[in-house]
Structures are given as C-alpha cells and as structure tokens.
Amino acid sequence: MNLSNAIARMISDMLEEKNEIEIQRNILAQDLGCVPSQINYVLSSRFTPERGYMVESRRGGGGFIKITRIVYDKDTLIPRIISSVGENLDADTAQAHTMNLLYHGIISEPQAGLILSATSEAPYRRLPPQVRDVVRADIFKQMLLTLNK
C-alpha cells in the first residue's frame, strides 16, 4: 500500500467512528513518517466536496484540520451536485459524484453502474476534445434530474 493510500485509509477509519474529526497535520505526518504536504495532498485529492467531505484548515496551534463527512439525503444532494457541475465535467469528477451518491444510499449499484458507463471516457472518444466535458456534464445532469423525480 502506498503512502497516500495509507493516509487516506487512516483518515477514513477515523471518520467511520464519527462524521467529523479534527487532526493535527504535523502530528499525523510524524506518526506516518511523512511530510505535512503529503497530508495536504491526500486531503485535497481524496477528501473533496465531490466525494462528500468538507475540509477546513485552522492556522496556529499546530495546524489543526477539521474534516467533516457531509450527510445528505436525496432531496438535497442531487440538486447540490447538479448545481455544482456547471458547464464542464471530467470523468474523474463524475465518478466521484456518483460514488458519493452510492455511498449515501441515494442511488443503487445498478444505477451507479449506468451513470459510470455513461460518463466514462469511452463514449466520448469520437467527440472533439473541447466538447467532451460539456456533453458529459449535460448527460450527467440529465441522469440526476431523472433520478430525482
């Protein structure tokens, strides 16, 4: 297991016990034998709003970081995702949103599979690169609107 995975796993395990934790970045880095910037990298890449997390940094006192797992229901999460997508959506962000919906029990595994298939890179290969993310965003939002009925 690489270091980023170990850091993400440790933070995820802490969040299993409660939906909000505070960690001291320097202490966590010291415990894991890494530099604090590695913790920052994991937080910015794996604990994002698209994946259902809010991360707040607090300066002073050793640099505390507050990580909150955002808990939504269908009536709030789907509209929030639709409004956050905007005009462009890459495949990785679509996957993160989809897995967040699945994690919260808002969509089923078969529904997630369909969304992931429709928003992966494969269906867009024949389109010019400059329109792929625009079309993907429109399709993704339309699928979510249909699920929200």
Image (cartoon, rainbow, N blue to C red):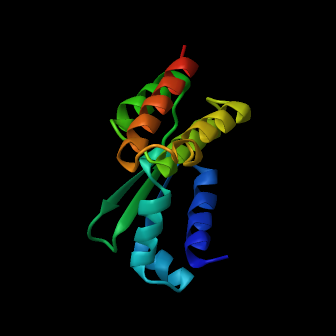
Q: Quadrant of the N terminus?
A: bottom right
Q: Position of residue 29 (x, y in %)?
A: 48, 79
| 112 or 103, nearer to the observer | 112
| 2 or 59, nearer to the observer | 2
Left-right relation of 53 to 110: left
In the figure, 1 relative to 116: above or below? Answer: below
| 49 or 148, nearer to the observer | 148
Q: Residue furthest left?
A: 60
Q: Position of residue 94 (x, y in %)?
A: 50, 43
Q: Position of residue 143 (x, y in %)?
A: 54, 26
Q: Is residue 93 visible?
A: yes
**Which residue is painted at 55% across and 46% down in the image?**
95
**Which residue is painted at 49% across and 30% down in the image?**
139
Q: Is residue 52 visible?
A: no
Left-right relation of 25 to 46: left
| 121 or 14, nearer to the observer | 121
Q: Position of residue 104 (x, y in %)?
A: 61, 36
